[in-house]
Amino acid sequence: MEYVRRLAHEKALAVPMHPGEIILAADTTVVIGDELLEKPHDAADAARMLRLLSGRVHEVITGICLRSESSTVLDAEVTRVRFVPLSDEEIATYAGSGEPMGKAGAYGIQGPASRFVDRVEGCYFNVVGLPIALVYRHLKAVGAIP
């Protein structure tokens, strides 16, 4: 979790701060076993990741950073996702579609890959890429939302 928090913090620091603003930055990764799955480099890398996820449970971890003039809040959300077993044809078709590119773990739960998801334990929006309830709680805590 420290990894995604650090990345979110670095992203937040890269944005110029203006008076009265709050900057929100986030970074998401997928973890299965001891392996970190970020964005695939190409279709072959996406297929490799999908083979790892096939029929197994993995964790989607999103780090967030809320930065204001007076404070910085770092936190993370973890969601467990179980994939159904995937055939070689399903993997090849999805990996070759271009859909996995730019997505941690080589899939987007909100798109065609939703058919691969058997179970979600935790925040669905975290898997999409932003744990909205977590962000909302922190915005309320810093007084940005009444």
Image (cartoon, rainbow, N blue to C red):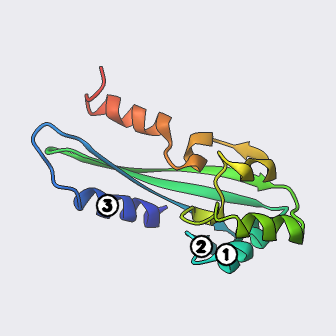
Residue at position x 37%, y 58% from top? 8
- Residue corresponding to mark 1: 43
> Residue 35: x, y in percent?
64, 75
Sequence order check: which comes first, mark 1 or mark 3? Answer: 3
Give the quarter of the figure containing the C terminus. Answer: top left
* Left or right side of 26 for 42: right
Crowd band around label 2 with a 10 angstrom C-alpha radius: few (<14), some (14–19), many (20+) = many
* Left or right side of 34 for 116: right
Residue at position x 67%, y 72% from top? 46
Residue at position x 67%, y 49% from top? 109
Residue farthest top in this picture: 146
- Residue corresponding to mark 3: 11
Residue at position x 67%, y 75% from top? 43
- Residue corresponding to mark 2: 40
Q: Amino acid at mark 2?
A: Pro
Q: In whole angstroms, how far apart are the C-alphas of marks 1 and 3?
A: 27 Å
Q: Nearer the viewer, mark 2 or mark 1?
A: 1
Q: Nearer the viewer, mark 1 or mark 3?
A: 1
Sequence order check: which comes first, mark 2 or mark 3? Answer: 3
Q: Tell me, yes or no, if residue 118 can be seen here.
A: yes
Q: Tell me, yes or no, if residue 30 can be seen here.
A: no
Above or below, comparing residue 70 to residue 1 in the picture: above
> Residue 4: x, y in percent?
45, 62
Q: Amino acid at mark 1?
A: Ala
